[in-house]
Amino acid sequence: MSTVLIVEDDADIRDILKTYLLVEHFDIVEADSLQSMHAELERVNPDIMLLDIMLPDGDSSDEIPYIRTTNPSTGIIVISARGTDRDRIFGLDSGADDYISKPFNPREVVSRVRSLLKRISRDDQILKFGILEIQPENYAVLKKEEPVELTVKEFEILYLMASNPKKVYTRGEIIDRIWYDDDYINDRVVDVHISSIRSKLGKDWIKTVRNAGYKFNRSAGDDEERDTSKG
């Protein structure tokens, strides 16, 4: 049975979410502040966290990167009254997996929880391509045994494509898999993330397939080693 941590200071909203999730046989843990959230995260490792942004003792969006390091396997869905494009994109880029604006339909929240569970329940195997190693358990990338610092979304894009290096991913497919077809995410956002990955990892690891999309290049490491040996 999957565990959902509801972090929400409004007791009525917590009760609504709890009621709908219990019907679907989820285990529920509750917190009403940042302090109680951290206490629960030390006690349990939830499968999913429903995270309100504006809490009595602070802004929880500042805590998302920390949660990613302490509970890397936990899926994070932000539920917030902040519903502007900027807020949604900031929340997702901070490391959240999904973003739902208030007011919300409880049935949609349950559906999003189930979708995220399916996504994170994949077999998170370590991927190795010569000098490159991708570790999904802790969102780590090593190149020649040295860490490469990627954002959460950059890592998820890289892992998605590296998991199936024969496939060409369209921008729409990347949005569907990484941002759940979020209406606020467009092709340009994908291009910016790909450009950033290339700048950090090396431009040859992700190939552009003209009029189609992007493809992981599993032989890029071999090419880099040959170039190094020639030098």
Image (cartoon, rainbow, N blue to C red):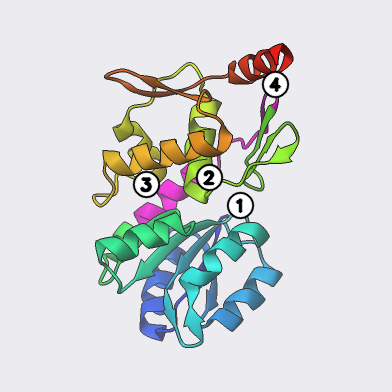
> Over which residues does the magenta segment extend?
109-131
Disc 4 crowd rating (10 Å Cα; few below 14, some 14-19, many 20+) is: some
Of residues 20 and 159, which is closer to you in this image?
159
Q: Residue at x 70, y 16 (%)?
A: 231
* Residue lying furthest front: 231
Q: Residues under labels 3 and 1: Cα distance?
A: 17 Å
Residue designated by label 3: 179
Magenta stretch encompasses residue 122 = yes
Disc 2 crowd rating (10 Å Cα; few below 14, some 14-19, many 20+) is: some
Question: In this picture, is 30 found above or below 98?
Answer: below
Tag shown at residue 120: 2
Quadrant of residue 85 within the rendered picture: bottom left
Residue designated by label 1: 73
> SS of the residue at dot 4?
loop
Q: Residues under labels 2 and 4: Cα distance?
A: 26 Å
The residue under label 2 is which amino acid type? Ile
Q: Residues under labels 1 and 4: Cα distance?
A: 26 Å
Q: Residues under labels 3 and 4: Cα distance?
A: 29 Å
Q: Residues under labels 1 and 2: Cα distance?
A: 8 Å
Q: Residue at x 58, y 76 (%)?
A: 37
Task: For marks 2 and 3, give the one nearer the viewer.
Answer: 3
Task: For marks 1 and 4, give the one nearer the viewer.
Answer: 4
